[in-house]
Image (tube, rainbow, N blue to C red):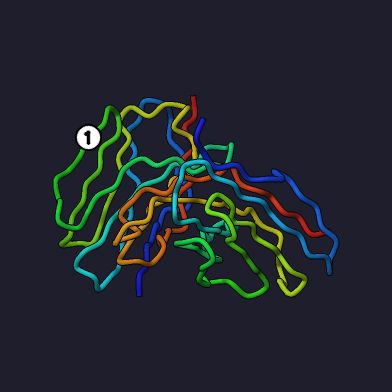
């Protein structure tokens, strides 16, 4: 079945450690996104990529890094510079178009990161 | 700047009641898209509907209906005869140009049996 796979589903990290969240899609979508979800704050955009080897910062990129070496993969690294990393992280993708936001987003099931 | 406001943080209804979820948006663009997504307890957001700024027709899909009014910058979502399975967090979102979607803060709907 086509879709987006995020792993791990749950992750615990000690302060000062970097951690990488995986996002893989087999939908042949060009654009991929990472959102962070906190209680009562909805979804906030961390990074997005509209094409391989290119990505842009979203609204809350500080303390995060991404790469887009393959069309189907868009991993997110939460670095030790992220002051409050405990959150639910959602990866999404969509077919790119001239108006990239006209298409619906397909989401993964999310990764819940807890910093101990 | 784009902004989406969902003023209702949480709504609780009894099964079979009708419920309306409010969404107010702000944008200076004349071409834009509005979306509703449902997030069940599993966490994955599920697409419900997309509307473009040139189409103000209301839409009905089964028990779901959407009321788009440009004059008030609102895109409200009504569930008729709610069911327990409707319990979820619902997000309204706005898309303009080549920017990524801007989401509201979500409304948690609890439908009691």
Q: Name the residue under label 1.
A: B60
Residue at 42 percent of width and 53 percent of height: B8
Q: In front: B69, or A21?
A: A21
What x and y, as percent, mark residue B60?
22, 34
> How many numbered marks, from 0 up?
1
Q: In this view, does B50 lie above or below A87?
A: above
Residue at 15 percent of width and 51 percent of height: B55
Q: Is residue A98 above or below residue B67?
A: below
Q: Tell me the chain of label 1.
A: B
**Direction from residue A63 to residue A109 in the image, left or right:** left
**Direction from residue A113 to residue A40 in the image, left or right:** left
What x and y, as percent, mark residue B83?
42, 26
**Direction from residue A3 to residue A17 in the image, left or right:** right
Residue count near mark 1 (Cα–Cα under 10 Å), binned few <14, some 14–19, many ≥20: few
What x and y, as percent, mark residue B82?
38, 29
**Direction from residue B7 to residue B88 in the image, left or right:** right
Q: In front: A19, or A55?
A: A55
What x and y, as percent, mark residue B28?
25, 73
Q: In this view, does A67 lie above or below A5?
A: below
Residue at 35 percent of width and 66 percent of height: B98
Quadrant location, the N terminus of chain B: bottom left
Residue at 72 percent of width and 58 percent of height: A20
Secondary structure of residue under mark 1: strand
């Amino acid at each position: 079945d086509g879709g987006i796979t995020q792993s791990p589903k749950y992750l615990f990290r000690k302060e000062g450690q970097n951690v990488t969240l995986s996002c893989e899609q087999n939908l042949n979508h060009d654009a991929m996104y990472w959102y962070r979800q906190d209680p009562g704050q909805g979804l906030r955009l961390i990074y997005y990529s509209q094409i391989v080897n290119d990505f842009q910062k979203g609204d809350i990129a500080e303390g995060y890094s991404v790469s887009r070496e393959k069309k189907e993969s868009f991993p997110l690294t939460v670095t030790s510079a992220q002051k409050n990393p405990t959150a639910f992280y959602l990866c999404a993708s969509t077919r790119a178009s001239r108006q990239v936001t006209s298409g619906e987003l397909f989401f993964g099931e999310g990764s819940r990161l807890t910093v101990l | 700047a784009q902004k989406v406001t969902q003023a209702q943080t949480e709504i609780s209804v009894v099964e079979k009641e009708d419920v309306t979820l409010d969404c107010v948006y702000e944008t200076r663009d004349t071409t834009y898209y509005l979306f509703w997504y449902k997030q069940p307890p599993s966490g994955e957001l599920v697409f419900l509907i997309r509307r473009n700024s040139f189409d103000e027709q209301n839409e009905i899909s089964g028990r779901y209906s959407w009321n788009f009014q440009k004059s008030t910058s609102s895109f409200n979502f009504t569930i008729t005869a709610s069911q327990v399975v409707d319990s979820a967090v619902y997000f309204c979102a706005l898309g303009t140009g080549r920017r990524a979607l801007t989401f509201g803060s979500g409304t948690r709907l609890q439908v009691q049996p």
